[in-house]
Image (cartoon, rainbow, N blue to C red):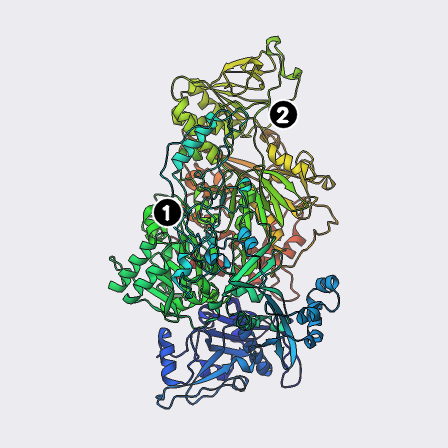
Amino acid sequence: MATPISQDGEAEVITARRTESLDAPHIIKLVEPWTEKLFGRVNIVNVIEKAVLAITLNNKNEEIMGHAAFLDFPNLPDIDSAKWEDWFNTKYAGGQVNSLNALFLHYFVAKKEYAMGCAQEIIRTAFNAVPDLHFLFLSVPVGQFPDPSLAQAFKPMEKREDGQSDSSVLFVCRRHDHVPVLHIRQAFVEDHDDLTPIFNRQSDMLHNTYGDYFLAELIEAQDADMHCLVAEVEKTSYGFMSISTDVNLDVLNQCFELVPFNGLRKPHPDDITQPPPTPPATPPTAPAEDEPEQESLGSKSASTAAIDEGATEGVNGEKSLGADAVAESSPKGSKHSSRAGSPAQEVKTDHRLSDAGSPSMVCELSDYEQNIKEAAETVEKSSPLSQPMTPKELVPPSQKRFVPTYHGAPNAFSIQLFCVAEQYEMRSCDFLVKAFSKFPDRDFCIVTVPHMVPEFPLIQNFVRVTPKCPSVLPQELYVFHRSGLLKNLRVRPACTSDLEAVEKLVTTIELKENILEDLKQFNAARRDIDGTEIQAYVAECLDQVVGVAVVRREEEIEYIRSHYNIEDFIYYNHHRREDHGHLHHFVLNPVFSHLTKHFFKEILRLAHKTCLHYPLYPPYTTKENLENHTLVSGLNALVPVRTRRQIVYPKEGLGINGPSERVLKEFPPYALNHVNRKLVLEPKVTVNARIVVVGASDVGLAYLETLVYCPHLRFNNITLISPHGLPGDLPPDQLRDQVLSNSHCFSQSDYAQMALRTWVNVVYGKMTAIDRTKKLVTVNGSAIVPYDHLVLCTGRQYQVPCPTGADVLNDTTNDQLPQSPHRRYQGPVPGNLFLVNDAYDGAVMLYRAESQLLKGNKKIVIYGHSMDAFTCLQALLKLGVCGSDLTLVEPPMADKVSCFNNPSVEGVVRARLSAAGVTMYGDSYLANWNDGEMEDGEDIATVAFTTSGAHLRLECQAFFCFFSKEVDKDAFTAINCACLVYDGRLVINASFHTNDVSVRAAGTLTKYQRKYHCEPWSHANFNSKEVGIALASEMLRLFDPTLEPQLEPPEEPLNLIPIYRSPNVRTAVLPGDLHYLDVSKPCLPTDLLVQMTQPDYGRELVTGQAGGGQDYFRLHVNHYKSVENITCLAKQPFPADNFLCLFGVHERTINNLLSRFDEGLVKDFYKYLMEPWALAIYHDRFADFRDEIRELLITSPKEGASTLEDLARQLVDEETGLTSEQRKELMLAYVSTGAKRAVETRLLNFMSYNHYHLPFYAKPGMV
């Protein structure tokens, strides 16, 4: 913030921010006659898009006062942006200038009377925002001179004597004239008076703990092992740093993955850094009967590696900046590791890919079919007390983690205390040069900070070390290597002589052969065999290669634009097709990891690109995709890009008018990561708070997705606890995906395109305890996961049913049950009882069914009345199970509403089951199995049920239970023992808080507090994805500096629960291969026939007949004439994604649906709604277009004038509605105010901008 003074002496408070493209119209208003003479005629939006640093100044009224755009090359048309350094060194005397410390001013405007002050503030902001920046250059055409506002800061650059004259003159602005480098010196006791106020302004903890003179005592206690430094400006101290060699390296090695840093010790001949050779595989042996089988615990993938962290010295003691650091960090063969402190506390973990140092494209996963087979066999052989519904984790048996042993001398010192005045905090890195000079024998500087402390400028140059799980230190560890002080990193095109150095750099990297092959191809031909352009670059320091990157031209940019929201980050039309690059490989020595974005900036400049795109494929991807990429070490510098929902086009009817093949072409799904010129100097806000999410439910996944897709935030410590990890890692399997019905929140491709495994650590297991005092979660009864914020999203699952114990021999009926059927089952679990709660359970079930139940006429009983019971029946029938061997037993429905809530659909489904030979019984409760004489380890042979009349006794070789979903027993025990309020379900308030401010919960696990008086309503009534997004939005207030902070739960004066408006969706494949879709508004369960009797129900529109020759399609249009319910039942798959878009749309938008239906023009909704006119409604941006139109109509055209909404509210009468005269009056106002013209303009803009998706619509000028 600054206060420039105008020429008239009037002061204006201004603040600086990053420029947005929407600022362009306001910037143009500031253009003066000298602007074009100085900078030429430019497109403002284009300059903003290409600038690496663009700054805008605002006053308190948000009025733009000034703007400047800086690029990393001069604005001279005859100078190649990739070769400006050669041009500069030829013409000007300034040997210290390079691409790291210099930027060029390409545009500047300011409000005339404040121009001088605005120029000074922009220059100061630029130097503060980029600590490595030391020179700002301004190129001025010969015969022109900078405006006085710039001339005060920019001075002519001294030319070489032999430099030739050219068409421009170069001016320079140096850092030391505006934001000088801090002078760092040894601290003296006399500095106490200057420093104490700075400490007290930032924290009073030290003052309260150690007294008034703690700082003087600390300074006075300096010795050879502890030094104190101060930053001095004009004989006043503004910063303080205390450094010491007293570091407990053993504790740090126990708590953090320090392998890349050689344990922070000097190399020693006796160091054991390589794991012992793996013994040859031996056939597994079954454990002895008296020896309990222990759960295998370990890591699913390599935990940390060299690319992100650390450097070491060579064995001979020589310092290495390149391959040695990488080579020592990820030993070959050490593919399985754990972050556990001891074997008793280990837990299987899947570390996020952004922390993985070894660039392997995917995690180390074994063959899935073998995993499923082993899990199924485990269930078969499990003890009676085991849980068959939760098979063992989807990970290979882990190996004991190798722990290196170090014997060398300590090689690190620590920062014990640090403080600096706010106005100088961006120069905090100036302390490091002096700090290393105090300990010339130490190569690492380390600092630990609490998790909840925001990342401050000093440690932005440090490398964050991945913590082990669990870590006894509740802090983050950051490391900086002495070589990071070097500022002469140079990026250049690779050449043949670099091959050996690159090979040494990538020695331990997975798929390193691909990097070397691409480098050889680049050196040989600069192109692939198919002609695709290749560009390879190396980063070197002190003539040593420390980084390599390989980029190809992005040939599928049309597909990327149409399938991913890259336009959240760029204006697509301002980037040429050849400006987009495809990143294949990126490796940078961790010593220089703080210069990752500079490496990307240089790649973009040298390659003449503006954007880079990098795909991350799921674990089951093809070998070809794996071989083309390696996992880049700079993943944290990229931003993840959200995928776009696609229109499902009719297979016939569009012809040549359809979208191009580049848009419709199908590729394996992948997650897209992106960087562009605007992002290379934009820092992310790092959040180290430990966020632990329990449960991979739809709510939990939506919550995680919202957090990780915040482009300006980087969450380092998000952990998911789930028995089977993240969904979506299994390869696609149509039959497996049909075992359960689907909420349509996420699909298999959605999981692949999100790639949450990139940003989320996964702990495989179940939460068994919560320690709220110590903020710890216990997993599987032993492993500990610490948290700062705990989010419970476990949902509810199908549980083992509890027999009522009724005496069926005496024909006990449902009215005479001795015990409730809803009790929790406490006895031994039969081995042939199946509980299917997710895709992995479904895969195990199908394997066992195929290997066992298809052999012979095995009788199978399905118990339940949920839709999952019907989908499971269909899956078994499709698998080949004979219908006569299947029996469906349905318990009474508590709310008297069936899962279909549509008599027509339900009747057809039951008819198809009967035709398949399936036996069905209704209103039956489980009385016992095996006649009540169940023994440990015994399978179910018979089951008995009570009804309202005679009892049932059925033969049973497999029992599938879909009776009711309840909170998992382990989760309930953990919640209850932690004294979280539980009233049938976990109690929360409207902002997701439990009675513990650090514990939040959402989803079907929860219910609202009784004070809201909304007992029937809970999150179970709403769309799970919307609930998860709302939960994340609430929590982002704690971390996002752009949002209003919320440190405590807000007060609730009205005690109202939030309203969620997204529809509830259920899709399924039902018996008879019937494809089913139901879309309905959030509501309490009410029988359809009862709903239709309400006077305000609206209308029901139906085409076809359930089970008839024409597929069934039902639309419910409410009394406001908006679509409120959609039900589809068809023999062939249909575009469900398209039809979902109809929810909430007015019938007039659907081409006057009601009038056409009444006139008999609509015979088949499937055909009608797939006609070309309807496809725009299915566009993913159509909802935004509707919101834009509504905003237009509720906004006053001019100050003081009434809006169309105000006029409509004045005219409308709820009893009589609008008369014809009132309609004419509204229409006249609609035309006369210009709203009609504005709506038409926006509609044409929508069609034009999205023409690549909607090419079949005519535009003005086409006809």
- The reply, left or right, for residue 148 in relation to residue 627 is right
Q: Residue at x 57, y 70 (%)?
A: 428
Label 1: which residue? Answer: 668
- Secondary structure of the residue carrying tag 2 is loop
Mark 1 and mark 2 lie on one chain; the one further toward the N terminus is 1
Of residues 720 and 139, which is closer to you in this image?
A: 720
The disc placed on residue 194 is none
In the rendered structure, the answer to whether residue 797 lies left or right of residue 76 reads right
Q: Of all residues shown, which one is farthest toward the top?
A: 810
The spot of residue 853 in percent (x, y) is 41, 22
Q: Which percent across, then down, holds residue 1181?
A: 48, 53
| Residue 283: quadrant of the picture | top left
| Figure check: 14 above or below 612 | below
| Res 817 visible | yes
Residue that appears at 47% across and 72% down: 44
Which quadrant: the N terminus? Answer: bottom right
* Mark count: 2
Mark 1 neighbour class, 10 Å CA radius: few under 14, some 14 to 19, many 20 or more: few
Q: Looking at the picture, how far across and down is residue 458, in whole percent?
A: 56, 67
Circle on res. 822: 2
Q: Is residue 1259 visible?
A: no
Q: Quadrant of the C terminus?
A: bottom left
Q: Secondary structure at mark 1?
A: loop
Distance CA(mark 1)–CA(mark 2): 45 Å
* Type of the residue with mark 2: His
In this view, the residue in front, 34 or 141, is 141
